[in-house]
Image: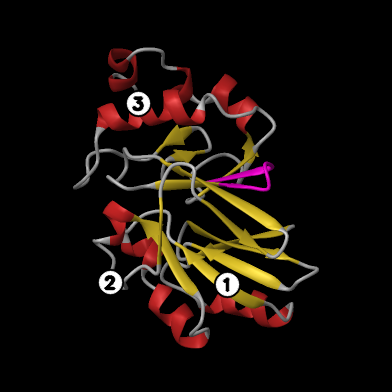
Amino acid sequence: MVLEQIRVGSDNFCYVVYCPVQKKAVVVDPGFDAAKALQVLEKNHLFLDYVILTHYHSDHSAEAKQMKTVFPSCKIVASKEDGKRLSVKPDVIVSDGSQLKVGNILLSFLLTPGHTVGGICIIVDGKVLLTGDTLFIGDCGRTDLPGGSLEEMFRTLQEKIVSLPDDLIVYPGHDYGEKPFDSLGNQKRTNKTLRARTLKEFSLIP
């Protein structure tokens, strides 16, 4: 499994994950600029199986239609709730426990509401956690936009994220932290949003 973290726009991260043996790839959150992801695909002679959108916000999803124009057979992947809000209709709907294969790579999905109603995170081969705008390095996604919920975010972080293995490497949707990625174990120890133990404590985080 190979993962390329690509900075798009001012601070968004897009990801190309691919199987070097079967030359199959997935692009996660192409954002406003598909060109960089397409360059990675071309440079490595990859076939695009899926475009996965962690949530519907345009800074993550705007170029999904362009990816499909270049690779007509690729499938757009999103959750049911956020899929309703996309400008392009999803081909595959995922939720908790859904899995997809890309070559020899196993993608496992978690439904992680809080930033949006249908936000998702992706576990890649049991090694990497792509968190979109659910979890950042040192923080979590904002909950004051339409569809956001402080209560849902707290529940997601405590019930879905904290219970995952420490050795997963967190790759977030934005470059907001002091580093572009980190182990989940270190985030559990240092991230204020994961350290909060009650909803009240969580709600008081600046």
Q: As displayed, is residue 104 above or below residue 71?
A: above
Can residue 131 be seen in the rendering of this structure?
no
| Residue that label 2 marks | 87
User: Residue drawn at (65%, 53%), measured in percent from left and top?
Assistant: 106
Task: Tell me residue 187's x, y (percent).
Answer: 57, 28
Q: Position of 17 compared to 60: left or right? A: right
Quarter of the C terminus within the rendering: top left
Which SS type dominates the magenta stretch? strand
| Badge 1 element | strand
Which residue is situated farthest in the left direction here?
Answer: 146
Dot 3 alpha-carbon crowd within 10 angstroms: few under 14, some 14 to 19, many 20 or more: many
| Badge 2 element | loop
Spatial CA span between label 1 and label 2: 20 Å
Q: Quadrant of residue 170?
A: top right
What label does residue 49 carry, if any?
A: 1
Q: Position of 74 compared to 203: left or right? A: right
Q: Are marks 1 and 3 in contact (CB under 8 Å)?
A: no
* Residue 130 is one of the magenta-drawn residues: yes
Q: Are marks 1 and 2 in contact (CB under 8 Å)?
A: no
**Image: magenta residue range:** 123-131
Spatial CA span between label 1 and label 3: 33 Å
What label does residue 175 carry, if any?
A: none
Q: Amino acid at mark 2?
A: Ser
Q: Position of 133 compared to 38: left or right? A: left
Looking at the image, tell me whether mark 1 or mark 3 is earlier in sequence order.
Answer: 1
User: Residue drawn at (48%, 67%), measured in percent from left and top?
Assistant: 30
What label does residue 154 carry, if any?
A: 3
Q: Nearer the viewer, mark 1 or mark 2?
A: 1
Task: Tell me residue 161's x, y (percent).
Answer: 50, 30
Q: As displayed, is residue 94 above or below residue 123?
A: below
